[in-house]
Structure formats: C-alpha cells, structure tokens
Amino acid sequence: STYSNFYFKRLRRIMPLAIFIVLLCVVTIALLEDGPEISKGVQSAVYSLCFMKNFQPHPTADEDYFLQLENGNDFFTHFWSLCVEMQFYVLAPFLLHICKPHTDNALRSFAFMTAIAAGSFAYSITGVPQEVFDSPLARLWQFLAGAMVLHSDRVLLEKKHKSNRNLHLQILSDRSVLQVDCNRSCLGDVSYSLYLIHWPIVCILDIYEITDWQRRRLCGTVDT
C-alpha cells in the first residue's frame, strides 16, 4: 500500500543512521564525561532512541531548548526536531486518511486540512511557549503546508478540467514522478547526516573547553 511503502522508505532512511549516531554519542559520553553526566547522557539517549526527546523533562523549569543550546551539555538536544517529525508520521494516517472526509472533492479536502492547520497555528501562538515549542500538535500547520499546496493545485485543476479527468490524472502522475526523483537525491542524505552529527561535535568541543575564538581558528576563519 501507499502508506506501507512510505513508512518503509522513511524508516530505512532515518533509523539506521540515527541509531548509529546515538550509540556513538553514548560511547563518547562514557569516555569523556564523569558519573552524573554519563547518567544524564544515557537518559537523553533513551528518549532519543524512542523518538520522544521533545517530551523529556527539562532539568529546570527555566531551562528551555535555547538555554540547552547555549550550555552545550546534552549530545541529543537537536534530536527534538527529528522526534517531532516521527511523531507527525504517526499522526498523519489519522489526519490525512482515517479522519479525512471520504470525498474526491479537492475543495473539501483542502478545507479539512486548512481547518486542522488553523487550529494548530492558533495553539502554537496561544499555548505555553515551551510546551508548544516541543509539541507536534503545534507543528501540524508546518507539516501540512505541502499537502495544502498540492490540494490547492487540485482545486484549480478541478475547476479548469472538470470535463477532462485524464489530463488531471496525468498532471498528478507527473508531479509524483518528479517528487520520487527529488527524493532520490543524495542532497537529502548529506544534509540529514550533517544534522545528526553537528551538535555532538559542538558538545565535544565544549567538553574540551574550546572557546568560540578557538573554534573559529580551528576552522580557519580567524585572521592571523
């Protein structure tokens, strides 16, 4: 089915490298950190492996995501966004298939998605800042943006080509082929790899107390 193929491809792309990076970070933490930090690191790794990092309790009520970035003491801080993405994939079948109105009318489908996105956006600007930052429900409007654009195109196509369904199906088919070709690009794999590894490198530099000036010099960006 379409859903099983989609999930198989996403899990095949995301899971192996994510698991490898988490295990590599745990080994690094064990080698470089002391007892309490090792315990915190392992706990954070478990949340990350379960793709629940965005729901991990913060050390203190005042320590949000951005303060964690400033402190640079959690190898898995950046995993929150990957976890939100994976949680959306769990919600997607219910939102886009089970709960979606059973209709071929593109306008109704577009209205359904618009209503969900509007509710999500309202929650994102009215809820408790730290809660909505970590919540996949407050991010639905961002994830649904692409689907809404697709359905808006379908609305226009239905108006222009009510008498020519073959043309409509051909355009959608061509779009699908283009999307598959884009997904095969290695650019996405490279960016995903950089996403997973960049923050652990920053944390390692922080452990060795390498200052920002020293980091820039190591990267060759400081004039001598």
Image (tube, rainbow, N blue to C red):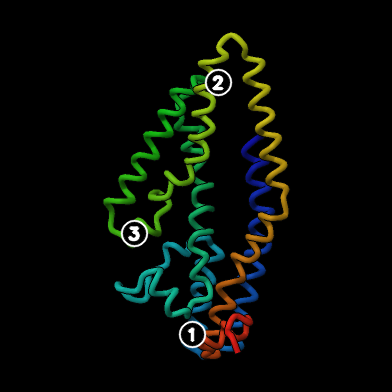
- On the rendered structure, is 205 left or right of 186? left
First in sequence, mark 1 or 2: give its number.
Answer: 1
Q: State the residue position of label 3.
A: 131
Q: State the residue position of label 2.
A: 157
Q: State the residue position of label 1.
A: 37
- On the rendered structure, is 73 left or right of 17? left
Residue at the far top: name it: 163
Front position in the image: 179 or 33: 179
The image quadrant that residue 57 belongs to is bottom left
SS at mark 2 in the image? helix
Q: CA distance from mark 1 to mark 3?
A: 25 Å
Where residue 154 appears, as percent x and y from the top left, is 54, 25
The answer to whether the residue labelled 3 contacts the one labelled 2, judged by CB atoms less than 8 Å apart, is no
SS at mark 3 in the image? helix
Residue type of the residue flagged with mark 2: Leu
Where residue 82 appears, as percent x and y from the top left, is 53, 59
- Residue mark closest to the camera, 3 vs 2: 2
The image quadrant that residue 166 belongs to is top right
Other-residue count near label 2 (Cα within 10 Å), few / some / many at <14 / 14–19 / ≥20: some
Q: CA distance from mark 1 to mark 2?
A: 57 Å
Residue type of the residue flagged with mark 3: Glu
**Is residue 141 at all visible to an observer of this figure?**
yes
Other-residue count near label 1 (Cα within 10 Å), few / some / many at <14 / 14–19 / ≥20: some
